[in-house]
Each structure stands twice: as structure tokens, then as C-alpha cells.
Image (spheres, rainbow, N blue to C red):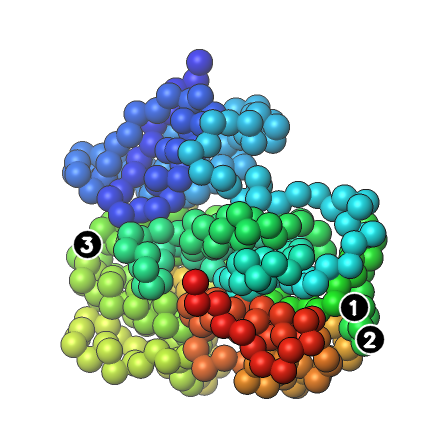
Amino acid sequence: MKKAIVYSSTGCPYCEKIKRELKEWGIEYEERNVTENPDYFNDLHEKGIFSTPVTFIDDQSFIGYRPNKMKEYLGITETESNNANQPEQETSEIYSAVAPEMFEEVYDLAIIGSGPAGASAAVYSSRGRMKTIVLDKAPGAGALAITHKIANYPGVGEELTGLELVDRIRRQAVGFGAAFVRTNVLSTRLQGEIKELETPEGIIKAKAVFIAVGARGNSKKIKGEEEFTGRGVSYCSTCDGAFFQGRVVGVSGDNEEALTEAISLAKFAKHVFFFIPTKKLHGEADINAVKDYPNIEVLWQHRVREVVGTDKFEGVLVQNPEGEQVTYDLDGVFLYMSGNKPNTDFLADQVKRDEEGYIEVDEFLATNVEGVYAGGDARRTPVKQAVVAAADGAIAAMSADAYVNKRKKLIPQYS
């Protein structure tokens, strides 16, 4: 039987996930916590690794959270993985494939997208006894699902990953009777009493539709990023900040997460270059928050173009406001670039959208088409937060309930 060695750090959510999955696969492991033992910390440094988790199996190292690559190496099939004795229902178990009988149904509400907006809408609609179906092509790839750490969601005291949070909401909706299906909505026909959503398998019909597809993130990696991930390129200060104690690091981003992480890293690093590619930060992030940290150097309109290194990470190539490209010698860089284009192209002219693709809605999240609603990152919101998207889902579900049942007023759910 193979045995693994897992290098972890205190407070790293993905370290906990990979340990849990190793147990589920029946793989014994030895844990080496770099936060608690400086010797383990130095072991990784000597190997040129500046990230956790790191899992060693035989002579193979898996830097970061790479369960699919590990399963491939171990020869674990998807069936074996899904049949593991899991303590909680995972995303793969929440979703079913499209079944032929679904095309015979006329659902009360069809929801496109299962992030915090879509999943919360499913909770409210299914609890309100509406026949609800949720369609999502990639449940683990949304903005919240790939977030390392959530610590400010109301009522959730412990830190958890974005995927763990949204799966809790999804499981709650399933408990009330909502159906979650993994499929891609190719196009829509939204006019009329019965709306039609075209998927590769067939047509899903519904009386009302909630569009909660989210926005595209920064999926395009820069040159050298993949090569040096975990060896100088990081994405989580909680997981990796201690590796850069007394060192020089860079943070690249234009959002609240980047600002927060720059401040967090300033408590470890000797100097932090904060590369902001734009003229201002997005959302409600306030750059004045860095004033108390003299070791943070803010560089506006500086875009990281390339990760530089030969055998090891050496720094980043940055384009300044004048268009010149300058190399910054760093010990590490943390990347937090966000996307801001909603995934609404598949709608074409079915609903009214603005010049950037955001769907236009009223205070009840209704679009210009009766019975069609939109929320979360599919509309313009004052701030991008999971709790705001979840609130959108609640409003949209109650609006759809009023529409389907031909009521003039929304009925809140108090109990």
C-alpha cells in the first residue's frame, strides 16, 4: 500500500481537504506541519517550495491542491472516489445527469447557475413548494467555489472554503426538494408563458427563469505562472505567508482580496510591492487601508506580464504606466486578478443587457421579460460579496413565486 507525506500549515483549508481525501482513498499519510515544526518548514525551502499543501507519494510531489492529478497517479477511478466513505455530501453527489423525464416536466422555476445566488434561490423556491431545477455546467468553478477562505459569511463562525460554503447552501436546497443538474445551457427562448432552455441533451421548460451565471474570472495565466506555482507563485497568504518571513514579495490585483492579502503579507514580509494594473481598486476596497503599513509600496497601473526564473523563481516582469517593462527581483508573488465580464453571451438579445453584458433588472430583480429574473454577478451590484448574491437569490425566488402563482405582492418566508 502506498503511503504519503503531507506538508501542511495551520489555517490552510486545502491542507485539510487533501488530508480528508487521502483518508477517503484509503491512503495512509504522515503529516508534517510547517507552522509547528521549523525543520519541516526548512525541508520545503531547501526543495524550492514555498506553498502548502505539498503531498509526496513515492518520488512524486504534488504542490498545492491537486486531487485529480493525485487520483490519476494512484489509479483511483471516479467511481471509487465517489463511493468513498465521505463525511459530507460533496458537489459530485449533489448533481445528477440530465434524465429524459426532465424534458417532460414544466418546472415552476429553472435556475441557471448554482453559485450563492442560484443556490439560495433554490432554497427559497423549493421551500416555497415550487418545482425547482438548477442547471450548472461547472459547479466547482465559480468565483465563490474557487475562493480559498471565507470568514465573514453571517452565521458561519468557522473559516471554510468557498466551495464548502456554497455546497452547504446547495445541500439545503436539495433537502427542500430542488434538483441540481450538471449541464450547459446553450441558448434560451424566454418569451411567452413557458420558457425554454436548450441544453446538449434536450429542452428544459419552466414557467419562470432565474439567471445567476456569474462572471468570468481571470482564467488566462501569465507566462511562467503555471511553472512556478508553489515555487514562488502563490494565491493564499494564510497558506503561504509564513514562507516569506523577512523577504520581498509582490501582490498583483485590483480588488478587495488583493488589498486584504497585501496587508496580511506585510506582517510577514520585509517589503511588499502592490502591483495594481488599473487606476483604482474595484468594489469597496479602500487603498487608505495600507497607510499603517510602511513596507507596502503601492504601484498604480503596473501590470504583471511574466513570472521570471530559470531553475527557480526570480521575480516578475511588470509593465509600468509608460509602457516600459521592468523586472522586479522578488522572493515570491501572490496573484489575485479578477474578471469582470458576466457570462451572459448565450442569452443574445433574449433579455436587455448593458454594453458590458450585465443584465438590467428592477428592484425585484425582474428583467424586461415577464417571468425572467437575474442576480448575483449577472447584474451590476454595488459590491461583489457572497452574502449580496445570496440575498439576490432570495429576492428573485420570491419574485418568481409571485409571478408563477399570479400574486400582486411578494410573500416573505418568515418561518
- Residue 342 numbered tag: none
Residue 331 visible? The answer is no
Q: Residues within 10 Å of mark 3 (few under 14, many from 20)?
A: some
- Residue 391 in the figure: left or right of residue 53: right
Mark 1 — residue?
Answer: 195
The percent coordinates of residue 399 (x first, y second) are 60, 75
Residue 130 visible? The answer is yes
Q: Secondary structure at mark 1?
A: strand
Mark 1 is on which residue type? Lys
Mark 3 — residue?
Answer: 245
Task: Tell me which residue sits at (83%, 52%) in the image.
Answer: 104
Q: Nearer the viewer, residue 414 or 152?
A: 414
Mark 3 is on which residue type? Gln
Mark 2 — residue?
Answer: 192
Q: Residue furthest top?
A: 1
Q: Quadrant of the C terminus?
A: bottom left
Mark closest to the chain's N terminus, 1 or 3: 1
Task: Check if mark 2's residue and mark 1's residue have beta carbons within 8 Å.
Answer: yes
